[in-house]
Amino acid sequence: MENILLYITWKATPEIIEFGSFALRWYGLLFASGFLIGLYIVKAMFKAENAPEAWLDTIFLYMVLGAVIGARLGHVFFYDWDYYSQHLAEIPAVWKGGLASHGGAIGIILALWIFSLRTSKKSVLWILDKVVVPTALAGCFIRLGNLMNSEIVGLPSDAPWAFLFVNAFPPYNDVPRHPVQLYESICYLISFIILYRTYWKTSAKEKQGMVFGLFLILIWGARFVMEYFKTSQGGFETALGNVLSTGQWLSIPFILIGLYYVLRPNPALKTG
């Protein structure tokens, strides 16, 4: 009997609708939606703790700037410095593509550290324990945006749920591949549910840094595993012998930091 290869033909286009030279894209809509929903969730956390809601607009601005600038610089320095070192003027050209989630995470953390110094006057962990909850959901939305763009595709696969990315750049439109964007999106959605329930249904938030640490373990642990299904995104993995991908090397420090915050004694219980 002849073997029949089963797969899903993925023909999605990045644009939702076009108005002349302007196009509304799925990625931008999902990216913005993630931040707006996150703002609503953090607002509920602020109300529960009687924190000033006037801070929310500032937090939103800091996070957007931190995420975009950090993600762009992360791509430039972690994945494609050989090119950008010769084309410095193109570094700010975010609209041409090229964002790295590890850089985005670092950018958000630094931005919220500045917010904590200038505005809240609290430990940065106070705000991180809150914003990481919806950030996991935003990560879910962003990976769906990657799916709509037919980018960050997986390795070839003969699984019946493999996607043939018709609109991906060659050579990634040649054979059915793992829909790794969908895998990651599901992982981040599960992480969001765990973090949301942990924050609202347990006493974990009373140990400052606990929810933040759990976020680092869940998100970057999932990212580490998902890298085994991805095509190479480049970076410094070759220089390190191709033992792990660039994304995996970058995920390890985040996981270790997460373990530290989850396992350390509760500072609030210390007596002087």
Image: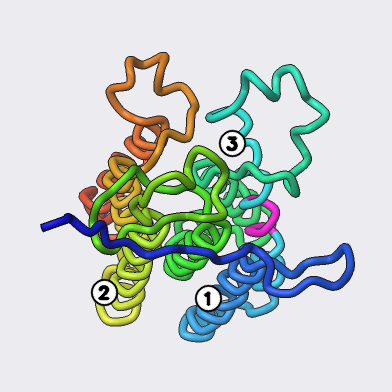
Alpha carbon distance from label 1 to label 2? 17 Å
Mark 2 is surrounded, within 10 Å at the Cα level, by few (under 14), some (14 to 19) or many (20 or more) other residues, namely few
Position of residue 136 relative to residue 52, above or below, is: above
Q: Amino acid at mark 3?
A: His
Q: Secondary structure at mark 2?
A: loop
Q: Quadrant of residue 257?
A: top left
- First to last magenta residue range: 62-66
Observer-nearest residue: 172 or 50?
Answer: 172
The residue indicated by pointer 2 is 203
Mark 1 is surrounded, within 10 Å at the Cα level, by few (under 14), some (14 to 19) or many (20 or more) other residues, namely many
Percent of width and height locating residue 162: 32, 58
The residue indicated by pointer 3 is 75
Comes first in the chain, label 3 or label 1: 1
Q: Amino acid at mark 2?
A: Ser
Magenta: main secondary structure equals helix
Q: Going by the image, does 192 lie left or right of 74?
A: left
Q: Going by the image, does 222 lie left or right of 78?
A: left
Quadrant of the image containing the N terminus: bottom left
Residue furthest left in the image: 1
Residue furthest right in the image: 20
Position of residue 186 relative to residue 75, above or below, is: below
